[in-house]
Amino acid sequence: MSVLLILAEQCEDAAGPSFALETDIALAVGAKPHLKPLPFTASLDAAMTLIEQGASWSLWWSEEASRPASVAIRKGNGPLSNGIGTSPALALCAAALRARHEVAS
């Protein structure tokens, strides 16, 4: 399994924001190891930077604590990449990482 898919699953399993996960994501997408990572798992703005140019996305969020956020991303006519999470940022991270995996495959 690719690193991007493993990180996507970790985003979906996370109970909340995680600096360690953000560091792993930053390294997986090519950030310099000595820089502080963006707060991908805590901020929608930061998570949006993981979406590749030309991709469209949709976010569904329920106010019910038992229902997670859900995100779908598609680049052009490519496959739909989905992600869920306990927050919109985590769901967006998961979907964006899956979409990056699809592009790289």
Image: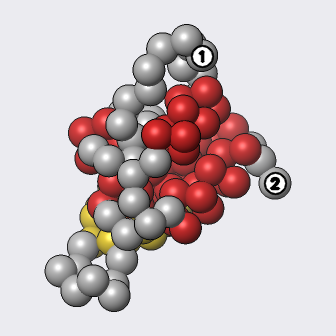
Compared with 78, 87 (above or below) is: below
Viewer-nearest of labels 2 and 1? 1
Question: What residue is rendered at 50% in x and 63% in y?
Answer: 14
Give the residue type at disc 2.
Met
Point 27% across, 72% down: residue = 60
Residue at x 46%, y 40% (from the top left corner): 19
Find the distance from the CA under tag 2 to the CA under tag 1: 23 Å
Q: Which of marks 2 and 1 is nearer the N terminus?
A: 2
Residue located beneath label 2 in the image: 1
Pick whichever, 17 or 6, lies toward us.
17
> Which is nearer the eye, 76 or 2?
2
Q: Whole-percent x and y of residue 93?
A: 45, 50
**What SS does tag 2 mark?**
loop
Q: How many labels does the image show?
A: 2
* Mark 1 neighbour class, 10 Å CA radius: few under 14, some 14 to 19, many 20 or more: few
Residue 33 bears which disc, if any?
Answer: 1
Question: How far from the left and from the top, in percent, is residue 99?
Answer: 55, 49
Q: In which quarter of the image is residue 10?
A: bottom right
Would you say residue 73 is visible in this rendering? no
Q: What element carries label 1?
A: loop
Question: Which quadrant of the rendered structure holds the N terminus?
Answer: bottom right
> 60 or 62, which is in the foreground?
62
Q: Residue furthest left?
A: 63
Q: Going by the image, does 39 lie left or right of 84? A: left
Instruction: Kindly tell me whether residue 9 is visible in this rendering.
Output: yes
Q: Where is residue 96 in the image (x, y as percent from the top left)?
A: 48, 48
Q: Quadrant of residue 28?
A: top right
Residue at 33% from the left image edge and 87% from the top image edge:
66
Q: In this view, does 65 lie to the left or right of 23?
A: left
